[in-house]
Image (cartoon, helix red, strand yellow):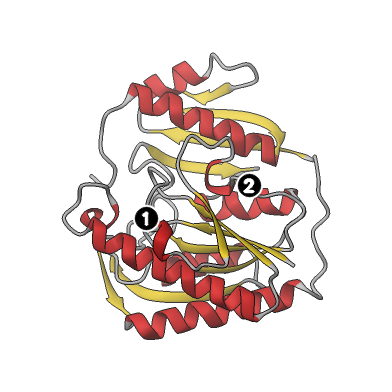
């Protein structure tokens, strides 16, 4: 059984602020250790439940956060960028399950380090008019590829957002949001035990659980940007239209939309120089 892990950082055990998760931050190096240990817990759980191969994708920011020499020796690691499929690079229908480690709630939610991909630059996102962020887009894309997402770790807001997409998904809350940059933390040992147990349970459920059928059904992605400049530039991409001066929309199969959204972010990054979490 092949298991895929997408690892973000904002939802990692103990981390609450930009200094914890941004390269150059005073606590970033410690954050990397914490992220690596959360991922290792998920790997252990997957292996315990019968995984024969575990592929981990470093999915945060520069995508060079996980410590390769401290990552579980039985896990393969995809590291660095650019990646055509970004946070889901390497995922295909050969995998039996997706685990999301260290994820966070979407822009506008009162969760720890909540945002949707680009700090405050993206104000909101929708898939077929359903509000979503990184959790929803990953879930929908994995399902379209025929792979069930079975487990997620993060703060309580992220876990609640995940189960709103899929009530069968197993979650491991590692902290409880007090506000966007504060939380009540579970002890690290306890949090990693919860991750390991949730990963094992999710992978076990993936065995008998009916897999979603791979689909090319079209959906509509809409993204509302802080800047009208970004929207006006993205309108130049064939198939992309404007809902209003700051909101773009495009229709297509979900995996194609996920890849195209990566192009959206590269365009937006070239047009803006503001740091996230401001």
Q: CA distance from mark 2 to mark 1?
A: 25 Å
Rendered location of residue 135, percent (x, y): 53, 56
Decide: few, some or many residues near mark 2? Use Cα within 10 Å; few <14, some 14-19, many ≥20. some
- Between residue 142 and residue 35, name the one nearer to us: 35
Q: Is residue 24 above or below residue 68?
A: above
Comparing marks 2 and 1, which lies closer to the viewer? 2
Q: Is residue 33 above or below residue 62?
A: below
Q: Which residue is mark 2?
A: 90
Rendered location of residue 31, percent (x, y): 29, 62
> What element does badge 1 sit on?
loop
Quarter of the image with the C terminus is top left
Rendered location of residue 62, percent (x, y): 38, 42
Marking on residue 114: 1
Q: Could you tell me which residue is drawn at 40 percent across and 41 percent down?
A: 123
Q: Is residue 105 left or right of residue 119?
A: right
Number of numbered discs present? 2
Q: Residue at the top extreme? A: 236
Q: Could you tell me which residue is drawn at 44 percent across and 58 percent down?
A: 105
Determine whether label 2 and label 1 are within 8 Å by CB.
Answer: no
Quarter of the image with the N terminus is bottom right
Q: Is residue 153 above or below residue 6?
A: below
């Amino acid at each position: 059984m092949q298991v895929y892990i997408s690892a973000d950082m904002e939802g990692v055990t103990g981390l609450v602020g930009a200094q914890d998760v941004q390269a150059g931050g005073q606590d970033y190096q410690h954050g990397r250790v914490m992220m690596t240990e959360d991922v290792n817990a998920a790997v252990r759980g997957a292996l315990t439940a019968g995984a024969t191969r575990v592929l981990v994708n470093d999915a945060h920011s520069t995508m060079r956060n996980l410590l390769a020499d401290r990552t579980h020796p039985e896990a393969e690691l995809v590291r660095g960028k650019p990646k055509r499929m970004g946070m889901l690079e390497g995922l295909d229908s050969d995998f039996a399950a997706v685990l999301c480690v260290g994820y966070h709630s979407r822009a506008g939610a009162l969760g720890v380090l909540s945002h949707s991909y680009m700090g405050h630059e993206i104000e909101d996102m929708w898939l077929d008019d359903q509000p979503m962020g990184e959790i929803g887009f990953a879930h929908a894309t994995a399902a379209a590829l025929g792979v069930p997402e079975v487990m997620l770790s993060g703060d309580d807001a992220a876990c609640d957002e995940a189960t709103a997409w899929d009530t069968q998904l197993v979650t491991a809350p590692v902290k409880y949001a007090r506000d966007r940059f504060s939380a009540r933390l579970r002890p690290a040992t306890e949090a990693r035990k919860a991750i390991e147990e949730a990963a094992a349970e999710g992978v076990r459920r993936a065995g008998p659980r009916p897999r979603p059928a791979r689909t090319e059904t079209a959906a509509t992605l809409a993204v509302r940007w802080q800047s009208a400049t970004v929207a006006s530039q993205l309108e130049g991409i064939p198939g992309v239209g404007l809902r209003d001066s700051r909101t773009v929309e495009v229709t297509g199969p979900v995996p194609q939309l996920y890849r195209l959204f990566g192009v959206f972010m590269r365009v937006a990054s070239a047009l803006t120089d503001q740091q996230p979490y401001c």
